[in-house]
Image: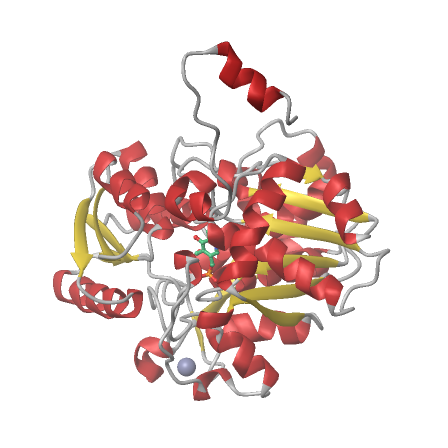
């Protein structure tokens, strides 16, 4: 892995060789999140836009020289990456905007953005010959790890809050994971998973702890910019819980700037649920990430419910360093966004997936965006993950007897 210079602590700046530490900077307990530092001159000699254009592989592995894995490491067979970026002119018209794209990451193999990170976790875990890989999750990171592990026959242990939506728990069981439903919150599951991993020596995928998750998540930025012909958008809207996705998007954009493949940094727009808005509050009050205190998080968008966002250092830097903003939206606004995305883009999002669009609606209403700007909205999770919430966002179907007259009554209203 000669393309990696070091793992740099984001608190004290100390740098480590990749073989020296697996996760955090040992000087700050579990909080010392590190960032992978690359040799971009070397990477630029191994990969360039012309080579990418000729590569028919649409998965995240097309960016392999930019990923923190050894050249000889095998990768899981599931198709991770290459999700569609739809130009959605009807959504743009509703918002009186000129250019709105929706990137549908609900199309990934386990139906959420988390596959991008879990794919890397499986490669790293197997590089270390881990017997067991573990994670705590609100549901999607777990489903992603479970599916990717299943695809290579890797044993894994999953900690999720008992309140996780049934579809996500079903995925874990179908993929054959050992599932621990924790009587507590996601934050409780996270702590328990950390303790268990240390006790039993399991490889830990946890968000905001394992530095390589950011590197998997950055592939969405690489794809967006490549899909737009390396003409970077003005803003990217993304929902934020722990802040790993937004930090990953930032990392991907910084990679592309360092390589000179894009010439401007899109503004990152982090959307939080009003009941789980720790990063929004910290950003508003100009707080240092390390001074943030846990809050009691509550939202229908379970995937972005986080009392103390684990990747808060990277998440605040992503918005501050791109001159973006944090926005908060109510659960009602999130639910309302689900059918709008469905009916105007044909994309079915889970609540956390639709929150990004709800954030764009709010940003337009508040005059934060200019109508000419080129906007990308990231849909991070599929609506089939949480059908109960989807049903709350829409009306009821017609129920008819086996009688054409009943259909006529419906048809007359069309
Ligand atoms: C995990 C997740 C998010 C938020 O990602 P963070 O890295 O926790 O900020 C958003 N949407 C969905 C569907 C997710 O699963
Ligand atoms: Zn440190």
Count of numbered badges drawn on the protein: 0
Task: Pick out the residue farthest to the left.
Answer: 200
| Residue at the extreme right | 372
Q: Position of residue 306 (x, y in %)?
A: 39, 68
Of residue 395 and residue 199, the one placed in the foreground of this image is 395
What color scheme is it?
secondary structure
Q: Quadrant of residue 26?
A: bottom left
The residue at 38%/62% (across/down) is 207
Apparent side of residue 273 relative to residue 41 in the rendered image (left or right): left
At x 28%, y 45%, the residue is: 166
Residue 47 rendering spot, x and y as whole percentages: 65, 43
Quarter of the image holding residue 199?
bottom left
Q: Is residue 179 left or right of residue 210?
A: left
Horizontal and vertical percent position of residue 188: 24, 69
Image-based side of 59 in relation to 156, left or right: right
- Please name the residue shown 13% across and 61% down the image: 200
Residue 225: in sight, yes or no? yes
Q: Position of residue 15 (x, y in %)?
A: 46, 75
Q: Is residue 70 in view from this perspective?
A: no
Query: In the image, what residue occupies the spot 57% across and 23% down?
Result: 410
Q: Quadrant of ligand 2?
A: bottom left
């Amino acid at each position: 892995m000669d393309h990696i210079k070091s793992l740099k602590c984001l608190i004290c700046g100390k740098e480590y060789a990749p073989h020296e530490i697996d996760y955090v900077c040992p000087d700050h307990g579990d909080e010392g999140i590190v960032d992978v530092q690359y040799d971009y001159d070397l990477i630029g000699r191994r990969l360039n836009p012309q080579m990418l254009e000729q590569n028919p592989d649409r998965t995240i592995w097309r960016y392999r020289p930019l990923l923190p894995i050894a050249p000889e490491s095998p990768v899981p067979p599931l198709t991770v990456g290459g999700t569609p970026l739809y130009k959605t002119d009807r959504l743009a018209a509703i918002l009186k905007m000129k250019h709105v794209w929706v990137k549908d990451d609900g199309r990934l193999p386990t139906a959420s953005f988390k596959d991008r990170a879990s794919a890397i976790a499986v490669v790293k875990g197997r590089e270390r010959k881990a017997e067991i890989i573990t994670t705590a999750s609100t549901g999607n990171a777990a489903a992603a790890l479970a599916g990717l592990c299943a695809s290579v026959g890797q044993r894994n242990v999953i900690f999720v809050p008992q309140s996780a939506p049934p579809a996500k728990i079903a995925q874990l069981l179908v993929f054959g994971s050992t599932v621990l439903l924790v009587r507590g919150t996601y934050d409780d599951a996270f702590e328990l998973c950390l303790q268990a991993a240390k006790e039993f020596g399991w490889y830990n995928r946890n968000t905001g702890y394992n530095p390589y998750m950011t590197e998997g998540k950055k592939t969405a930025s690489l794809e967006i910019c490549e899909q737009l012909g390396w003409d970077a958008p003005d803003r990217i809207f993304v929902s934020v819980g722990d802040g790993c996705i937004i930090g990953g998007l930032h990392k991907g954009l910084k990679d592309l700037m360092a390589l000179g493949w894009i010439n401007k940094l899109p503004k990152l727009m982090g959307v939080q649920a009003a009941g789980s808005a720790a990063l929004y509050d910290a950003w508003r009050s100009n707080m240092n990430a390390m001074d943030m205190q846990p809050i009691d998080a509550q939202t229908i968008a379970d995937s972005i419910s986080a009392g103390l966002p684990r990747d808060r250092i990277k998440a605040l830097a992503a918005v501050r360093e791109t001159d973006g903003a944090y926005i908060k939206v109510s659960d009602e606004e999130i639910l309302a966004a689900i059918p709008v995305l469905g009916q105007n883009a044909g994309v079915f999002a889970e609540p956390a997936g639709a929150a990004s669009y709800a954030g764009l609606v709010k940003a337009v209403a508040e005059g934060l965006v200019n109508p000419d700007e080129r906007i990308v909205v990231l849909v991070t999770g599929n609506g089939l993950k949480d059908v109960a919430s989807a049903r709350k966002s829409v009306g009821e179907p017609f129920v008819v007897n086996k009688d054409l007259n009943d259909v006529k009554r419906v048809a007359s209203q069309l």
